Image (cartoon, grey):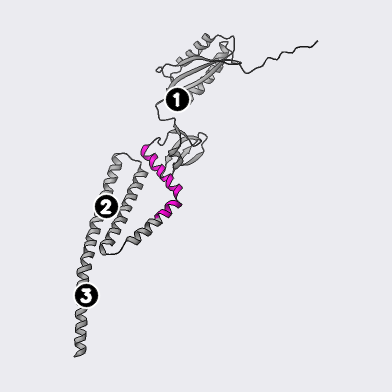
Amino acid sequence: MENLGTESNQLSNFMEWASNFLITYGLKLLGAIVALIIGFWLIRKFSKFLKNTFEKREMEPSLASFLRTLITVTLKVLLGISILGMIGIQMTSFIAILGAAGLAIGMALSGTLQNFAGGVILLLLKPFRSGDFIEAQGYTGTVQEVQIFNTVLNTPDNKRIIIPNGPLSTGPMTNFSAMPTRRVDWVFRIAYGDSFPKAKEVLNRLIANDERILKDPAPMIVLSSLSDSSVDMTVRAWVKGADYWGVYFDMQEKVYDVFASEGLNIPFPQMDVHLHQQK
């Protein structure tokens, strides 16, 4: 009988403990499950909202996808930490360890993170786009692709250059394709004794016959320098960006041919040497 009474008391104590456990932790667990379901639902809705917002603003697809994934993962981690805290698990030590690990990883990947930040800046501010012809970090070429960490250029002689986005976003850069028109500059030389008005008339005629050269702004021809061996003329004209190199090289060729036929001499450096005979 005593054994039965003892077992009855033990069962009663167990039932009481189980009841208290379910009341204490069961409600917490149920609340955590509900919060988890609602949290995932809200994160999914927010992710769709971000996707629509990025598409409306025409953000670079690679950057939009990366940012949406990064934000979604961060929100899910925060949700998980909150759920564990609701159940009663102490997260202080875990958060401290996570912060220390994040700091160590950040220091180890400082250069990579700098390139990532530079990529975000380039994709958001868009100082250049794919297809633009730029000069940066000592290289000149056409932009093939702007990635998260690097920018890929193709040089005029068909070399592929990969430039890290960190220094590219903070250093000087020239975008030759940013403006619809560009100014072409030449310096042509004639010999002393040749007629400058005639040379100017020939240059004006060559410019007028080239339909690629814009009339507004008007071309400019000036006598810019009296050098040691030549009279230097500076010529400036405006063209569409796509016509720049064609106009530049064609005018050089035309001037070389026409100046000769018009009796205008293109000089080269020369030195007169006078010999004096000693008596």
Marks 1 and 2 sit apart, C-alpha to C-alpha, by 51 Å
Q: Are marks 1 and 2 in contact (CB under 8 Å)?
A: no
Task: Identify the secondary structure beneath mark 3.
Answer: helix
Locate residue 253, reporting x and y percent.
Answer: 54, 20
Where does label 3 land, which residue? 17
Where does label 1 land, which residue? 243
Q: Residue at x 22, y 78 (%)?
A: 14
Locate residue 130, reporting x and y percent.
Answer: 41, 37
Quadrant showing the N terminus: bottom left
Q: Which mark is residue 43?
A: 2
Q: Residue at x 35, y 61 (%)?
A: 94
Please determine whether, in this image, residue 114 is positioned above or below residue 190: below
Q: Tag 2: Cα neighbours inside 10 Å, few (<14), some, or many (≥20)? A: some
Tell me the magenta residue range.
102-127
Task: Identify the secondary structure beneath mark 1.
Answer: helix
Q: Residue at x 33, y 60 (%)?
A: 92
Q: Earlier in the sequence, mark 3 or mark 1?
A: 3
Instruction: Report the predominant secondary structure element of the magenta stretch.
Output: helix
Please determine whether, in this image, residue 8 is positioned above or below residue 117: below
Marks 2 and 3 sit apart, C-alpha to C-alpha, by 37 Å
User: Which is nearer the eye, 30 or 196?
Assistant: 30
Q: Amino acid at mark 2?
A: Ile
Q: Residue 172 occupies which quadrant of the picture?
A: top left
Q: Tag 3: Cα neighbours inside 10 Å, few (<14), some, or many (≥20)? A: few
> Which numbered disc, 3 or 1, marks the residue closer to the eye?
3
